[in-house]
Image (cartoon, rainbow, N blue to C red):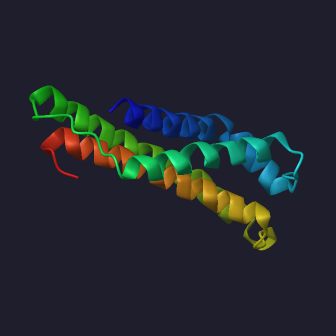
Amino acid sequence: MLKYWISFGLQSLGTLIVLWRGVPFYRSFLSGELDPGSKNLLWSILVILLIQPAYWWARKRAPNPGAKSQGKTVLGHTILFLSRLIFVFIGSLFTAVFYMDMADIHLSGRIILLIAILFSTFCYTLELERLGKLLIDGSN
């Protein structure tokens, strides 16, 4: 069970980095400054390396919080809300990137990296949803 929570913590850390570094990343993405030596590129790769292995490892090891109770039901709903809120926020930032400069975006390493970060965030929100549902009714 401890290994699961470590994995969940790594995913959470990766998502917090996306939220913390999001605006600088998007600015460098739009300006074309996201080169191999860029700090934002290193942060982006770190996010993917934190979230993806931890998510796929934890996917096989869902926690069992035990019998549901009123406190766990409220916590479960709070976690589900947080999951949706995170994905809407990060998804809207990604959407803004595409709408702001759609003509200049080419299928390149930068766009693939952007999609990989969005997919990693999606995986984290799925993990949050699974945890929230387990707390609410004990099912995946």
Which residue is depicted at the point 23% across and 46% down?
A: 133
Q: Is residue 127 left or right of residue 130?
A: right
Q: Nearer the viewer, residue 97 or 129?
A: 129
Q: Is residue 81 left or right of residue 133?
A: right
Q: Nearer the viewer, residue 59 or 90?
A: 59
- Screen quadrant of the N terminus: top left
Residue 68 to residue 140: above or below: above
Q: Is residue 97 left or right of residue 70?
A: right
**Residue found at the very far top of the displayed protein:** 71
Q: Is residue 124 visible?
A: no
x then y, percent, for residue 52: 54, 51
Q: Is residue 49 visible?
A: yes
x then y, percent, for residue 77: 24, 39
| Label tally | 0
Q: Nearer the viewer, residue 17 or 63?
A: 63
x then y, percent, for residue 4: 38, 37
Which residue is depicted at the point 30% across and 48% down?
A: 130
Which residue is depicted at the point 61% across and 53% down?
A: 117
x then y, percent, for residue 26: 73, 49
